[in-house]
Image: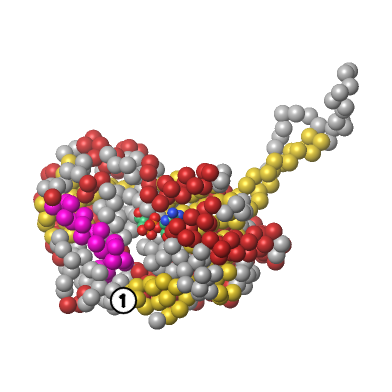
Amino acid sequence: MQTYQLRINGRWRDSSTGEFFDSYDPFTGKPWASVARGSAADVDDAVHAAHDALTNSAWSQMTASARGKLLHRLGDAIAANSAELARTEVRDNGKLFAEMSAQTAYIPEWFYYYGGLADKIEGSVVPLDKKGYFAYTTSAPVGVVGIITPWNSPLLLLTWKLAAALAAGCTVVIKPSEHTSASTLEFVALLEEAGLPAGVVNVVTGFGQEVGSPLVDHPLVRRVSFTGSDATGSRIGAQAAGGIKHVGLELGGKSPNIIFDDADLDAAVNGAVSGIFAATGQTCIAGSRLLVQSSVHDEVVRRVVELSKTARMGDPADPDTQVGPVTTRDQYEKVLSYIEIARSEGAQLSLGGAAATRPECGDGWFVEPTIFTGVDNSSRIAQEEVFGPVLSVIRFDDEAEAIAIANDSRYGLGAGVWTSDMARAFRMTAAIESGTVWVNTYRAVSYMMPFGGVKESGLGRENGISAVDDYLETKSVWINTGAPSGNPFVLK
Ligand code: NAD
């Protein structure tokens, strides 16, 4: 068993309680690491370390250009260690090595992009409507940021927040998911080895109530950037409002992937299968509702089922594996329970529908790629986020019906449209209520492209130039260049 401590102010240390908890390998179902169980006292130490770094340190004295160059060096260090970081994530969350290594190799780009942005954060001179003043704005870091992340893509989702926060000059306390703490700790230690000053980024591992909640409540934390479930996000949003804090929420989804009869069906079928079964369906943008036009419905279903049957399951560290385990035992049980819910709702099972018992799956938490057809969009399997390898196929007749079904959801994170009619593509992208719409592709993301949800999928956007504004406060400065202020109590 490997042991992981807290990382506060550039040092490893035990939690104030001295307690640890187990982190499990989803492929074996057994614990592989022991992680420090942080407390509110540890959060307080970490936030003070971050606040000291913000107000009085090499970091706070650094010019924006130097900060940008430092971010580039951090990117280089991540690039040099990306395979190692990927291996830790595979061990901790069961994602395929093939997918993880592509992800960790892509992460440096966020540090290069936001590093380039660091010294382009400018204020402006305002041409005032009043004479006798020189007025301008400056931008300052918002303060200490609390970052709370989920287990499904620990480093990538952390990076979306961290690179922008560092470019803005903020300091940070991270609370990773209790299911996947290891890679975040290794990542932060790596950044410090590459020159990030101590205290700029701190990590307190542990549970939501014991670490996450005190982090949100801490008076020196001025912004909370959260990715996770909508239930937790709603609670955190309310808590942050109590302290009048900025908050960014990246939450769940039930994304529609819509295939019209004029689509390139080969591409659409590939997109439908990777949209739901990549990362074992454990992505917020999983295309979990497949909407298929009636005229091609049976053919698309047949082809999606045939292709899904070929998925090789097994050890996520094996480069040939195509579908890995579910990350946690709780999530595994939740996925199986949703399969039962779909059955009881009358959906027809076209593939899978059970725990995977193939020999190559060993004792891991595997669920067979599962496809339900004849799903009613008002049923629970179509409305609630499963976060696993379960696809609901829903039939529609025309564009208006496709839009109505797509938008009949409390979520609005991602959507796919497969069509060869570009006018239709434009109409659909305008009509679908979601933060991202992909046309004839699915699941593409970039550091350059804003990402976030509408409706109950979240608040705010990550990635792209404007994401850095979330980590800045504007200050308005008025300088009197005209007559000195007169005595207000002397009548003229
Ligand atoms: P979760 O909400 O259970 O946990 C997320 C984080 O919040 C964890 O670190 C957890 O310890 C912490 N937490 C739990 N209770 C807390 C509390 N009371 N106060 C503060 N922190 C608390 O989510 P999860 O199961 O880890 O992740 C899966 C969810 O994340 C899915 O709903 C998925 O859609 C969503 N997600 C969204 C995006 C996106 O960008 N929109 C990306 C990935 C995952």
Residue type beneath disc 1: Lys
Q: Residue 322 colored magenta?
A: yes
What's the residue at 54%, 69% (across, down)? 16
Q: Which contiguous range is marked in magenta? A: 321-343
Q: Observer-nearest residue: 169 or 261?
A: 169
Q: Looking at this rendering, what residue extends furthest in the bottom direction?
A: 1
Which residue is under mark 1? Answer: 30
Q: Quadrant of residue 228?
A: bottom left
In this rendering, position of residue 336 left or right of residue 295: right
Residue 105 visible: no
What's the residue at 62%, 67% (across, down)? 199
12 in relation to 400, above or below: below
What's the residue at 40%, 68% (across, down)? 180
Q: Quadrant of ligand 1?
A: bottom left
Q: Quadrant of residue 152?
A: bottom left
**Helix, strand or loop at mark 1:** strand
Residue 288 visible: yes
